[in-house]
Image (tube, grey):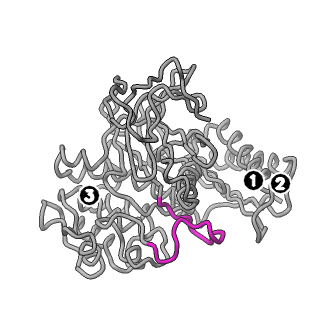
Amino acid sequence: MFRPNPAKSSPNSDVTEVVPPGHLYAGEVQYDDTLPAGSVLGQYIVERVIGRGGGGVVYAAHHESQPRTVAIKVLRAEMACYPSMITRFLREAEAVRKIRHPNIIEIYEISELEPGRPYYVMELLEGTDLRKLLQVHGRFATRELLELLEPICGAVGAAHEAGIVHRDIKANNVVVVENKGRRLVKLLDFGIAKMLGPETAGQGLTEPGAMLGTAHNMAPEQIRCERLDGRVDIYALGVLIYQLLTGQFPFHADDPRQVALLHLQAPAPRPSALAQVPPALDAVVLKCLEKRPEKRFSSAAELLVALRAAVGLSEPAGGDISQLAVGVHLELRSGDDEEPSDEVFEDLSNVLDTSEQILTRAGFALPLHTSTALLGVRIAAHEEAAERVALAALVAELTSALEARGGRQASVQVTLSFKVGQALTRDNGTSRAVVGGPLLDLGTWADASRSGVR
């Protein structure tokens, strides 16, 4: 809950001004629901406003007793009277927490400022969004393009695996943080994300026929308010690639309605008309920008493979190499046709927690961690035959632990798949980490060994 901090707040704080880091507000109070510097939300103390949107205000804050800085997004008071806005705000936070990917902003907790006015606490990124970076940097070379698109495609692929379509991928929803000469890329703003599959009546993010998104980045089916799947994000990635290569949008006009019409009717332009782009890269962009979804790349992983090939790389830029690695994939299903009971939810959580502990203890990283799936990977330390034996023993241990868990529900079905294969690894400064490759693409797991937990 929110409470003023009398030691730090001031009746003369100017709550409408966005000020640079290290400064506090000063001036006359204006009518606004912005929280003054020094306000306390749970265990965090507000420092300053760092962003504003139509639905929420984002603050920089620090922990009361720990050396931890965060960003806090609070729903605007005037939006809290609309149940749909509260639902959308909370859906964004839950969607991001469900994905848990290193290239998607991390959300730590969700709470309420006051009844019916939620906020969530997330990591604070001291970086620059791609739109501003493009303005300063200008067009990106193809190798730089890969450095940016690899993590973005990884984030989008993880979202789709978790059953979430972003629907608003654009340059200003991607933040780039420079850290010791390396770029950390984060995908933001799942505020209009769409959950794949049937939703409970009345709990969707939009009403039928409502169009959400940004005109310059919207796929034709999004403009027509049709049923969407992950290929709407592939279209937006094509727009982003075009923009990074040329400095412009593929379609532009003063009126957003005219932009939308161009997306619906006009042939997609080739990036090479404005920049030095090889024909193979033209083809990748044009495939992303196909009007019909079935003609686009089927996944972000497929797009990334084509993108690497188009610039003459079989592996990612930045010194990444292909190595033998091992993987374990856990998939959860609930046989209940209706909303799962509390007991089922608890059992699902127990399965995930137990699996995470065993895999982490065995040295596995978890590039995919959702409410219904886990993917654990680690670089192989021995020859393939020895790794297969060790992997089979680990899966047997995991199977035994899951079968012996307390509170098992008959409707909860657990499937374990395990595989030894190639993965792309990257030097992170202290060791090598798995960052991509076939092992992280579940579409390549058709030949994986499987074990069902009874």
Q: Position of residue 356 (x, y in %)?
A: 68, 43
Establish if 308 lies above or below 4.
below
Q: Which mark is residue 240?
A: none
Q: Mark 3 or 2, which is nearer the eye? A: 2
Label 3 with label 2: CB-CB less than 8 Å: no
Which type of secondary structure does the marked residue at label 3 adopt? loop
Label 1 with label 2: CB-CB less than 8 Å: no
Label 1 with label 3: CB-CB less than 8 Å: no
Image quarter of residue 43? top right
Q: Amino acid under label 3? A: Gly
Q: Which residues are magenta?
A: 192-210
Q: Is residue 194 left or right of residue 265?
A: right
Which type of secondary structure does the marked residue at label 2 adopt? helix
Residue matched to label 1? 348
How far apart are the alpha carbons under marks 1 and 2? 9 Å
Q: Is residue 196 magenta?
A: yes
**Main SS, magenta residues:** loop
Q: Which callout, 1 or 2, points at the residue further toward the start of the chain?
A: 2
Residue sitting nearer the eye, 259 or 46: 46
Q: Which mark is residue 312?
A: 3
Q: Is residue 391 left or right of residue 317?
A: right
Q: Mark 1 or 2, which is nearer the eye? A: 2
Q: Which residue does the image show at 55% across and 61% down from the upper left? A: 84
Q: Position of residue 112 (x, y in %)?
A: 61, 42
- Going by the picture, which residue comes out furthest to the top? 7
Residue matched to label 2? 343
Q: Mark 1 or 3, which is nearer the eye? A: 1
Q: Amino acid under label 2? A: Glu
Establish if 203 lies above or below 63.
below
How far apart are the alpha carbons under marks 3 and 2? 52 Å
How far apart are the alpha carbons under marks 1 and 3? 44 Å
Q: Position of residue 55 (x, y in %)?
A: 45, 52
